[in-house]
Amino acid sequence: MAFELDGERIAEENRKRLKWLEEDFEHLGRQLTRRGVDIERLTERAAAFRVSVPSWGLGTGGTRFARFAGPGEPRNVFEKIEDCEVVFKLVRTTPGVSLHIPWDQPESPAELRAFAQARGLFFDSMNSNTFQDQPRQALSYKFGSLSHTDPAVRRQAVEHNLECLRLGVKLGARSHTVWIGDGGNFPGQVHLRKALERYLESVREIYRALPEGWRLFIEHKLFEPAFYSTVLNDWGTSYHCVRELGERAFSLVDLGHHAPNVNIEMIVARLIQFGKLGGFHFNDSKYGDDDLDSGSIKPFQLFLIFNELVDAEQARIPAFDPAYMLDQSHNVTDPIESLMTSAGELVRAYVQAHLVDRARLAEHQEGNDALLALQSLKHAFITDVEPILAMARYRAGGAIDPVGVYRSSGYRQRAAQARPASARLGAGIV
Ligand code: LRH
Ligand code: MN
């Protein structure tokens, strides 16, 4: 690689900002001490937070109308990993990378695994793709995949998922995520009960082939690409399926996969209570599955979701180990900048959720004091914890100001020189 974002540049930029960070950190520390909170313990929690980056989030995303490629786009999975390394170097909370197959199909899994390991990265969840037809694919997924009426198409889709599992073992992954776009655009097009039965029959085969120690995540979505009925449409259907499949199957919550105004933190509380919360695809949205940057539209909702997660963590719910992953489409921003700031927004919500005085909140809840109960949460949410986030990055060898360091490094400009733009114009999320 002709260029790298070296540690010396990070240190040099940190030196310019350290004095004010220490001032702000100390001031916040005094404020939190008055609230009975130890800022050092919170900073450790912030530094220990982990969220995985989606490989498909390193390129510029698009919509069905158009995709406007950005400069220095990664042209293959190795260049995506190089960009993941930059994110990890600067924010220190993103060592995991989720791959999408076949978009990231490597010629040599061993070479790709070593390439990532050399950069301090590992592969998190594998993601299969039976929502697009690939060149030379025998049967089309136009009318579905794992729930298709034709057993041969279901067979093909199951085989693809089994191939993802085999590849994932070589790459050291530990889970597999299945999202399908199966559904119908018109009433009557799909038999609603039979389609789900066919889906379950197919996923059972994938579950039976799950490697030792792996977890299977199934991801529900209200609509798109199907615009009338979606086979795996909501958390209830997902929960039924993971119960049917077995103890290593869990529901994955993609925040953008719900109708506007759905109380997602309540779905999270339910799945925690039922022992079936597998993990998240974090993003944000205003209308549909907009895949916008986490915390960019509804930061209070993100806080309320982490409030449920931290409450469960502190209640020591058995086997509570949700996988945190970003799943975003960066259509108008530099993907590296969006991934760094989004990872930061998750840590912010996580740290703020630790500021909730849960004993006091329980008193207000038991006493039906609605106003003070809400205030307990709002007090935590309005606390500016940025000094804790920056100090955690700094102490972990990262950047106090990741975007500032990234921009001053000229990494994107140098990527644009080294990665001539492919002539590929078009549309679609990647
Ligand atoms: C579907 C989805 C799914 C991925 C895809 C890239 O909307 O959220 O998680 O496979 O985006
Ligand atoms: Mn998703």
Image (spheres, grey):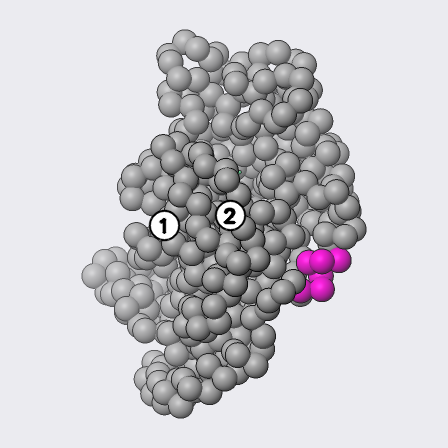
Q: Secondary structure at mark 2?
A: loop
Specify start and end residues of the magenta stretch as a single range.
114-119
Q: Position of residue 77 (x, y in %)?
A: 63, 48
Separation of residues labelled 1 and 2 (CA atoms): 17 Å
Residue drawn at 68 percent across, 58 percent down:
116
Q: Is label 1 within 8 A of ligand 1 (CB to nearest ligand atom)?
A: no
Within the image, what quadrant is residue 67 found in? top left
Residue at mark 2:
421
Q: Secondary structure at mark 1?
A: loop
Q: Is residue 57 magenta?
A: no
Amino acid beneath label 2: Ala
Q: Name the residue furthest top.
A: 188
Q: Is label 2 within 8 A of ligand 1 (CB to nearest ligand atom)?
A: no
Q: Position of residue 254 (x, y in %)?
A: 46, 43
Mark 1 and mark 2 residues within 8 Å of each other at the beta carbon: no
Q: Is residue 117 magenta?
A: yes
Q: Position of residue 200 (x, y in %)?
A: 60, 24
Residue at mark 1:
332
Mark 1 neighbour class, 10 Å CA radius: few under 14, some 14 to 19, many 20 or more? some
Q: Is residue 418 above or below residue 160?
A: below
Nearer to me, 414 or 171: 414
Residue drawn at 67 percent across, 32 percent down:
161
Q: Is residue 325 left or right of residue 139?
A: left
Q: Is residue 27 left or right of residue 163?
A: left
Residue drawn at 52 percent across, 70 percent down:
90
Residue drawn at 38 percent across, 71 percent down:
355
Amino acid beneath label 1: Val
Within the image, what quadrant is residue 306 found in? bottom left
Q: Is residue 237 above or below residue 282?
A: above
Q: How many marks?
A: 2
Q: Is residue 316 visible?
A: no
